[in-house]
Image: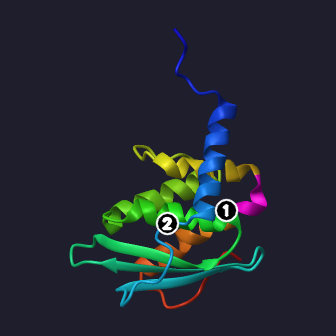
Amino acid sequence: MESMSTSGDELRDLYRELILDHARNPRHFGRLENPSHQAEGINPLCGDKLKIYLDIDSKNTITDACFEGSGCAISVASASLLVETIINFNTGQVAKYFSAIIASLTNTEKQAGIDLGKLKALEGVKEFPTRVKCATLAWHTLNAAIKKQHRTVTTE
């Protein structure tokens, strides 16, 4: 009977494929008509530019979300994975995911009780410190949108 376990190399390859798929075919790409929340973010080092649009209802649930912009594969994939993940989350859940993903990408302590699911694919970026800002741009932009901060978010 063969083992169903996946080696570290196979897992890295699966994650790499997931990142490439989201970079080439981003989910929820575009602009919401009349979003309740929005923010813009830039990463001047890499040239990434993103706008995140959210519809948040009276119960603080994200009922719809999308993004537009341009950037490197990591930046676009991160935004695509983010938006795919957060629809139907409340803003409290999003805050926990924000903390968990930032911690996982910056090698700080792990957030207990958060299953990152597909977002774990982004963890490989921490092996390339100059690319961490590409992966976190969408998350910082999301945070600014939720807080209705009216300034452009920058990674610098």
Which contiguous range is marked in magenta?
Answer: 128-132
Of callouts 2 and 1, which one flags the residue occurring earlier in the amino acid sequence? 2
From this view, report whether residue 142 is shown above or below residue 1.
below
Residue 62 among those drawn in magenta: no
- Identify the element where label 2 is drawn: loop
Name the amino acid, label 2.
Answer: Arg
**Nearest the camera: 111 or 124?**
124
Q: Residue furthest top?
A: 1
Disc ID at residue 74: 1
Q: Residue at x 66, y 40 (%)?
A: 12
Q: Residue at x 69, y 53 (%)?
A: 125
- Identify the element where label 1 is drawn: helix
Q: Residue at x 53, y 46 (%)?
A: 110
The Cα atoms of the two marked residues, 2 and 1, are separated by 14 Å
Q: Main secondary structure of the magenta part?
A: helix
The spot of residue 104 in percent (x, y) is 58, 50
**Nearest the camera: 118 or 28?**
28
Name the amino acid, label 1.
Answer: Ile
**Nearest the camera: 155 or 6?**
6
Visual colour scheme: rainbow
| Residue holding disc 2 | 27
Q: Residue at x 27, y 73 (%)?
A: 60
